[in-house]
Image: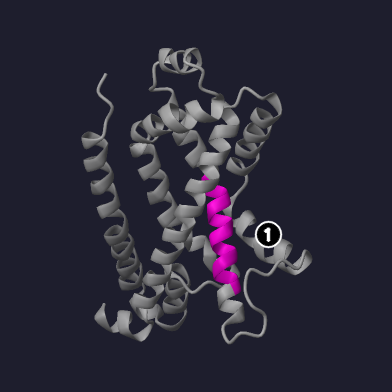
C-alpha cells in the first residue's frame, strides 16, 4: 500500500478531497441557510423560490450539475472563476467550478436539515417573537435559526459526510482528487486492484469517521433540552 500511496501521490489526492469538502461545505451552508429562510418566509414568492430550488436541485444528479458548471457556465456562458493566463488556470478553474457545483447541490440538503431543526422549536416561540414586535428577519436571526442549528447538528453532519464522499464526482471535470487517483491506479496497476480499492476505502473512512464522532459529541452536548 505504501508503494501505491507514493507512486500515485495519494496524499495530494486526498488533500484535494479535503479542500473540496471544506470549501464546498462552507458554500453549501451559506446557500442552504438562505434557501431555508426563503422556504420559511411568509412571503409567497420567496417561499416558492426556496421550494423550487430544493425540488429542482435535490432531484438532479450531482454529476449533471458538476458537468454543467464546466460545459454550461464556463463553456457556454463564459463564466471563469479563475484568472485566464495564470500558470494553473485550468486546474484552478476546475477546482472552483467543482466547489460551486458541490455547494449548490448540497445546499438543498442543508436547507432541509435546517427545516428539520426548525420543527423542533415550539410554535409558541415564534408567536412570542411576533408578540414583542420582532419582524420576520429579526425573529429568524435572534430566535429561530440559532435553535434550528442546534437541533439540526446530526442531519447537518450527515450532509457533510455525504459531501465528503460526493467529492469523487469532481473527477468528471478533471479535478485530481481521490477517485481520479484510483482510476489511474486501476489503469496502470491492475495487478493490485484489491489493494487499490482497499487503500481508497480506508482513506475515506479516515476522513469521515472523525466527522461522525465529532457530530455525535456536539449533538449530545448542544441538544436543546425541553
Q: Range of the magenta residues?
A: 93-107
Q: Nearer the viewer, residue 38 or 176?
A: 38
Residue located at (43% from left, 70% from top): 16
> The C terminus appears in which quarter of the rendering?
top left
Q: Nearer the viewer, residue 4 or 19?
A: 19
Mark 1 neighbour class, 10 Å CA radius: few under 14, some 14 to 19, many 20 or more: some
Q: Would you say the magenta stretch is mainly helix, strand or loop?
A: helix
Extreme front residue here? 133
- Residue occupied by mark 1: 68
| Placement of 9 over or under 98, stated as above or below | below
| Placement of 165 over or under 213, stated as above or below | below
> The N terminus appears in which quarter of the rendering?
bottom left
Q: Place residue 196 in its image quadrant.
A: bottom left
**Residue 11 placement (x, y as % from top left):** 34, 76
**Residue 2 placement (x, y as % from top left):** 25, 80
Q: Nearer the viewer, residue 82 or 8?
A: 82
Residue 190 lies in magenta, yes or no?
Answer: no
**Residue 49 placement (x, y as % from top left):** 68, 35
Residue located at (68% from left, 59% from top): 68
Q: Secondary structure at mark 1?
A: helix
**Residue 173 placement (x, y as % from top left):** 60, 69
Residue located at (67% from left, 80% from top): 84
Residue 83 in the figure: left or right of residue 223: right
Residue located at (38% from left, 71% from top): 15
Amino acid at each position: 500500500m505504501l508503494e501505491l500511496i507514493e507512486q500515485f501521490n495519494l496524499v495530494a489526492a486526498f488533500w484535494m478531497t479535503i479542500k473540496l469538502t471544506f470549501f464546498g461545505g462552507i458554500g453549501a451552508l451559506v446557500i442552504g441557510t438562505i434557501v431555508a429562510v426563503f422556504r420559511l418566509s411568509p412571503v409567497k414568492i420567496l417561499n416558492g423560490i426556496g421550494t423550487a430550488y430544493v425540488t429542482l436541485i435535490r432531484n438532479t444528479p450531482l454529476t449533471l450539475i458538476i458537468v454543467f458548471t464546466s460545459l454550461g457556465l464556463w463553456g457556454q456562458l463564459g463564466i471563469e472563476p479563475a484568472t485566464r493566463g495564470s500558470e494553473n488556470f485550468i486546474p484552478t478553474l476546475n477546482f472552483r467550478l467543482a466547489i460551486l457545483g458541490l455547494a449548490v447541490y448540497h445546499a438543498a440538503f442543508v436547507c432541509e436539515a435546517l427545516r428539520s431543526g426548525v420543527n423542533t422549536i415550539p410554535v409558541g416561540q415564534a408567536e412570542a417573537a411576533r408578540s414583542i414586535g420582532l419582524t420576520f428577519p429579526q425573529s429568524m436571526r435572534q430566535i429561530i435559526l440559532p435553535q434550528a442549528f442546534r437541533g439540526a447538528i446530526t442531519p447537518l453532519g450527515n450532509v457533510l459526510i455525504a459531501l465528503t464522499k460526493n467529492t469523487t464526482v469532481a473527477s468528471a471535470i478533471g479535478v485530481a482528487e481521490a477517485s481520479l487517483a484510483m482510476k489511474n491506479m486501476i489503469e496502470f496497476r491492475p495487478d493490485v486492484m484489491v489493494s487499490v480499492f482497499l487503500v481508497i476505502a480506508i482513506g475515506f473512512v479516515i476522513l469521515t469517521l472523525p466527522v461522525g464522532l465529532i457530530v455525535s459529541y456536539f449533538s449530545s452536548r448542544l441538544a436543546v433540552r425541553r
